[in-house]
Image: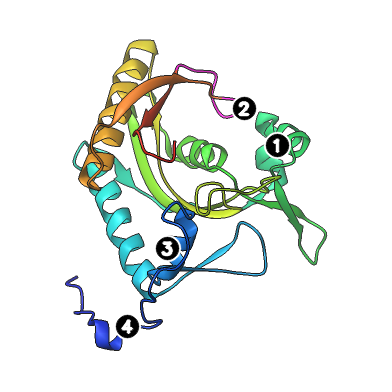
Amino acid sequence: MTDVPLYASTLWPPVRPRTGEASASTIDLLQTLGLVARTDATGVHTLLPLGVRVHERLSAIARRAFEERGALTFTPPTLQSRRLWQETGRWDAYRREGALLTVRSSGGEEMCLAPTSEEIAAATVRDHLRSFRDLPVRLSLTTTKFRDEISPRGGLMRGREFTMADAYTFDAGPDAMRASVAFLNDACTAALSGMGLTGVFQAPADGGSISAGPSTEHLVLADSG
């Protein structure tokens, strides 16, 4: 789909002159440029019309990076059952960390607003997998995630509600898994480079409760850290 032209004369809200120190926060700059707006809930932001344009383009770059390397895009639900998360033991783990946002339906069913999508991705592939000959399965997604951060900070970097470009692979053995790790690292580097970031590099990381490892972070040096 071709973008409809967006003209400064019709833009809402209009871009305001930036005030304050040059070292003011990134979220201050984003607000001044009319990309996002704070809400009365810490760590929750509104994407304004210009911000929606930027968001869609970044999502398209990430999606293309994974699809060009053979991943298929799917969209899992954000609202997920407690039973699904209890299968992996991560319902209690995330509750202990204080990161899990939960809701209860009118029928009393307890559910969560998913902070990540491993559970639902594994359940979906499990239901459609006929044999090991169907592997590898590589799925990518760009969905809304929720994490009840104790102290949301850095504007959009540690929000309670955010969009995550993500991917999951399912492999028949360790060698195939290593090939998938290389695929993921290559796709992440391509996505970040495609967004105009330079000097992208990789470093070992702690996977925490999400991964037993090996884990890799893709980093870009910036004046702010």
Q: Secondary structure at mark 3?
A: helix
Q: Position of residue 115 (x, y in %)?
A: 59, 45
Q: CA distance from mark 1 to mark 3?
A: 31 Å
Disc 3 marks a residue whose amino acid type is Leu
Disc 4 marks a residue whose amino acid type is Leu
- The answer to whether 12 appears left or right of 104 in the picture is left
Q: CA distance from mark 2 to mark 1?
A: 8 Å
Disc 1 marks a residue whose amino acid type is Tyr
Q: Is residue 135 above or below residue 15?
A: above
Proximity of marks 2 and 1: CB atoms separated by less than 8 Å = yes
Q: Tell me which label, 1 or 3, sits earlier in the chain.
A: 3
The quadrant holding residue 223 is top left
Q: Nearer the viewer, mark 1 or mark 4?
A: 4
Tell me the crowding category of disc 2: few under 14, some 14 to 19, or many 20 or more residues within 10 angstroms, Cα based: few
- The answer to whether 197 appears left or right of 117 in the picture is left
Q: Which numbered circle lies on residue 30?
A: 3
* Residue bearing mark 4: 11
For the residue pair 200 and 187, the one nearer the viewer reads as: 200
Tell me the crowding category of disc 4: few under 14, some 14 to 19, or many 20 or more residues within 10 angstroms, Cα based: few
Reply yes or no: does residue 88 show up in magenta: no
Tell me the crowding category of disc 1: few under 14, some 14 to 19, or many 20 or more residues within 10 angstroms, Cα based: some
